[in-house]
Amino acid sequence: MTTQRVLITGGGSGLGRAIALRYAAKGWQVLLADISLERAEAVAAEARERGAKADAFFVDVASDEAVLALRDAVVARCGGVDHLYNNAGVASAGTLLQTALEDWRWMLDLNLMSVVRGCQAFVPGMIAQGGGHVVNTASFAGLAGAGGLSSYSVAKAGVVALSETLRAELALSDSKVNVSVVCPSFFRTNLLENFRGPEKTRNMAARLMDRAAETADDIAAAVIEAVMAQRFMIIPTAQERTRWRLKRFLPEFYFRRLIAALRAAGRA
């Protein structure tokens, strides 16, 4: 039986690391790509300790050339991938009027265009091999429409729309490549490492992460279960699934509740 291969960008820490180690425990060959090769190599070593084949690669997902070089290196090493996690990303906050255009470009390049690059680089190989699964990491911020996270929310909403579009295009071509999009809310991770935005907002986000019941490993477990079941929209926490249904079916009521909650958070 051929060992299945999973590639995870941003695999050197946080959710990417947690996903990698769970795939390793399942016996998959784990391919870790990160802007920090040292971190990717450390996670690859952890995966090997679990009995899996694992390799580490450098990638800057903001670079067209680097993503194509990653593809070529992965194909040379193991022929391709079966599951692709476009997971690398950064965090920011600020209103539309507060956020400088330079920060908008930074955010869209790293959180949206990186997913475009990953899909364009690896999906053709999946189609050619007769199947695969693309998993794009968005955020509940891309669904919630909350204020104060303008560029981040727009980038993550773009990842949701990109995933919907790719899913439709693959279905129309009768491809056996599946697509999922992951929309987690706050959980305990290192997402704020490269944060841009007001310090007050960063501190609030840090508090919400610290208070979250779920760890990165909890989210990884829910995500992988849903991917294996070939579910498209993956909202790994029950509270956010309820909020998403509320927004879809009672949008004005949801909006009033959202504004009240944001005002209360601001006063706190």
Image: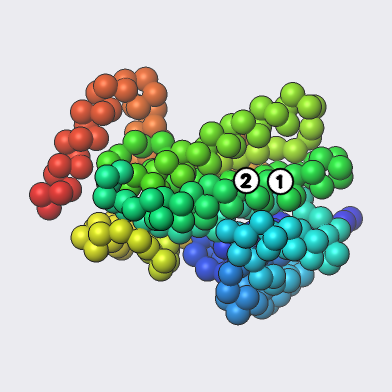
Residue nearest the observer in this picture, 19 or 27: 19
User: Is residue 184 at all visible to an observer of this figure?
Assistant: no
Q: What's the residue type where badge 2 is placed?
A: Val
Tell me whether the residue at label 1 lies in contact with that at label 2, contact meaning CB atoms closer than 8 angstroms: yes
| Percent of width and height locating residue 115 | 60, 48
State the residue position of label 1.
120
Residue nearest the observer in this picture, 226 or 80: 80
Image position of 71 (left or right of 209):
right
In this rendering, the answer to whether 228 lies above or below 65 is: above
Query: At 41% from the left edge and 68% from the top edge, which residue is drawn?
Result: 193
| Percent of width and height locating residue 220 | 54, 55
Residue nearest the observer in this picture, 181 or 215: 181
Disc 1/disc 2 C-alpha distance (Å)? 6 Å
Query: At 57% from the left edge and 48% from the top edge, which residue is drawn?
Result: 113
State the residue position of label 2.
116
Identify the residue at the far front of this view: 101
* Colour style of the rendered protein structure: rainbow
Residue at disc 1, secondary structure: helix
| Percent of width and height locating residue 156 | 46, 44
Q: What's the residue type where badge 1 is placed?
A: Gln
Which quadrant: the N terminus?
bottom right
Query: At 73% from the left edge and 31% from the top edge, which residue is drawn?
Result: 170
Q: Quadrant of residue 58?
A: bottom right
| Percent of width and height locating residue 183 | 47, 43
